[in-house]
Image (tube, rainbow, N blue to C red):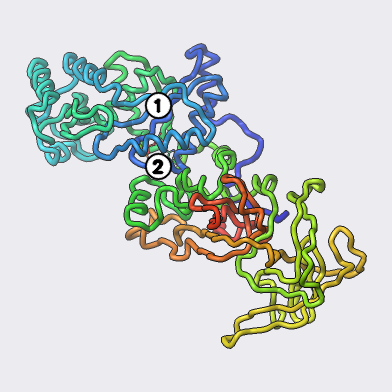
Amino acid sequence: MEKEVIHNRMPEEKSLNFIEEIIEQDLSSGKYERILTRFPPEPNGYLHIGHAKSICLNFGLARKYNGRTNLRFDDTNPVTEDVEYVESIKEDIRWLGFTWSNEYYSSDYFDELYLFAVKLINKGLAYVDDSPSEKIAADKGTPTEPGKENEYRNRSVEENLRLFEDMKNGKYKDGEKVLRAKIDMAHINMLMRDPIMYRIKHAHHHRTGDKWCIYPMYDFAHGQSDSIEHITHSICTLEFVPHRQLYDWFIEKLEIFPSRQYEFARLNMTYTVMSKRRLLQLVNEKFVSGWDDPRMPTLSGFRRKGYTPSSIRTFCDKIGVAKRDNLIDISLLEFCIREELNETAVRVMAVLNPVKLIIDNYDENITEELTTENLPNDPGNIRTITFSKELWIEKEDFMEVPVKKWFRLAPGQMVRLKSAYIVRCESFTKDEEGNLTEIHCTYIPESRSHNDTSNLKVKGTIHWVNAKTAATAEVRLYQRLFTVENPAAEEGDFKSFINPDSLTIIKNAFIEPHLQHAEKGAHFQFIRNGYFCIDKDSKPGALVFNRTVTLKEGFKPKSD
Ligand code: ATP
Ligand code: MG
């Protein structure tokens, strides 16, 4: 097999990652009997490979330590959320191979969260602020200057209770009032400068309908939801480090179950973008065919492209759990699927850029049956293929004026047809524009594979399909979606770096006829052309294949 160059590959022998260390300590000290993690997607888009990292981590930890994981839809923003997303997220998690203990929604906790807010008001730790959002932002100060307290900060508990209730009852318009925590306007952590807990939004929610017109902010919903569920280890990405202090403050002041937050580096991958906001733009502006376009870094995109759940789990495992942000080479993910399919994918022959090869000395009335291996290293696992006078081969396997060390077809030169005979090229024809139209060969009857008595040594073996029995198919080849490593980090619109050649459609490839009956979800190696699967657009009589990955890493990443 080809030798692979692996970038960012972690050592095989595994030590505990920092979260595992914390968990082992918490279990051995008796702090917890059993761990409970959660995966908290916001249902505002499809899951991407970055989410897979979080899923594998949260569910993986629970699996390893005999704990449990909740699936919690973080649906506190009524405007961007949709049931379509909820369903796709569940499908993707199941597909990855994980099962959640409970399915929850942050919106299930709206009543409880409201009471939590009332409790803080009663403790003198929250107040209703009438300032417009610009004023609130301006009064926050800067990292080097303290913020300003305003006149609403000292409202009485009674007034705050009444106003908050009025907010809930729809007495005010969007933006007229907010509820803020009363912490410290000079706090060194800007997020602690009286953060907003509730805002008014007269919007329909996909689960609670029109019951609420006030919605909790992330910081007042996430930690409290963790606590309500008794999540022991709440694992999130590094951008939430500054939020941890607030997370702890709310829990302490509310005197509720002390969930703890731990942060790891989010997964970033080369030649793609990884935020739902950007992915949504690609979908809405039709740069791709949908969330499951095989060029998308979404789980549904990878699934459609032919990635297996295990290849994605292996990838997540290999990249490990980092504490500092990094950019993972997409070729590592490709390595994982390639390595797996190399073991499992049945080898078949398909010709993507066909030219007719005619064997002049072969009887045109004969269709011969030959055998070929389904998998290398498994000699007993064979199937029958047919051979006749006219075959399809790849145009690239012929060269009129061969370069040095050309071991494939050229005038007078011999090559082995995979699992069949050795042929010698006798002549070729071209059309008026100079395009190759036919190649004429003679075959060596004694050179039949598995029974070769010809004593001929040829260096090249090429694949072919019998023209008499071949089926046709559309074949879709994919390249990187972007031309630069980190499109989101470039100046200007990330969409200006979209690779115009990211999709090549071959309308009329020739394939072995049995592939017409291949099952959806089956994986094949088209010999010498890569690994392929059947696309969902495929129909009987109009087959469509996707290239999952090429056979070799065709793209050399910069070494740094
Ligand atoms: P995006 O930035 O793509 O919109 P998000 O963080 O807003 O993602 P959520 O639905 O809130 O998306 O994410 C659910 C969980 O997945 C969170 O715990 C989040 O930290 C985690 N997550 C999201 N993106 C990544 C990533 N690239 N790498 C690792 N974990 C991620
Ligand atoms: Mg989010």
- CA separation, marks 1 and 2? 24 Å
Q: Amino acid at mark 2?
A: Tyr
Write the residue at 75% across / 60% down. 386
- Cβ of mark 2 under 8 Å from ligand 1: the answer is no
In the image, which disc is placed on residue 261? 1
- Tell me the crowding category of disc 2: few under 14, some 14 to 19, or many 20 or more residues within 10 angstroms, Cα based: many
Write the residue at 61% across / 69% down. 353
In the displayed structure, would residue 254 be above or below residue 93?
Answer: above
- Cβ of mark 1 under 8 Å from ligand 1: the answer is no
The x, y position of residue 432, in whole percent, is 58, 88
| 1 or 2: mark nearer the eye | 2
**Residue 179: quarter of image:** top left
The x, y position of residue 350, in whole percent, is 65, 61
In the displayed structure, would residue 479 be above or below residue 204?
Answer: below
Write the residue at 54% across / 33% down. 97
Identify the residue position indicated by label 2 in the image: 46
**Residue 547: quarter of image:** bottom right
Q: Is residue 319 left or right of residue 511?
A: left
Q: Amino acid at mark 1?
A: Gln
The x, y position of residue 48, in whole percent, is 44, 43
Res. 188 in view? no
Q: Nearer the viewer, residue 217 or 359?
A: 359
Q: Is residue 487 left or right of residue 165?
A: right
Q: Nearer the viewer, residue 210 or 467?
A: 467
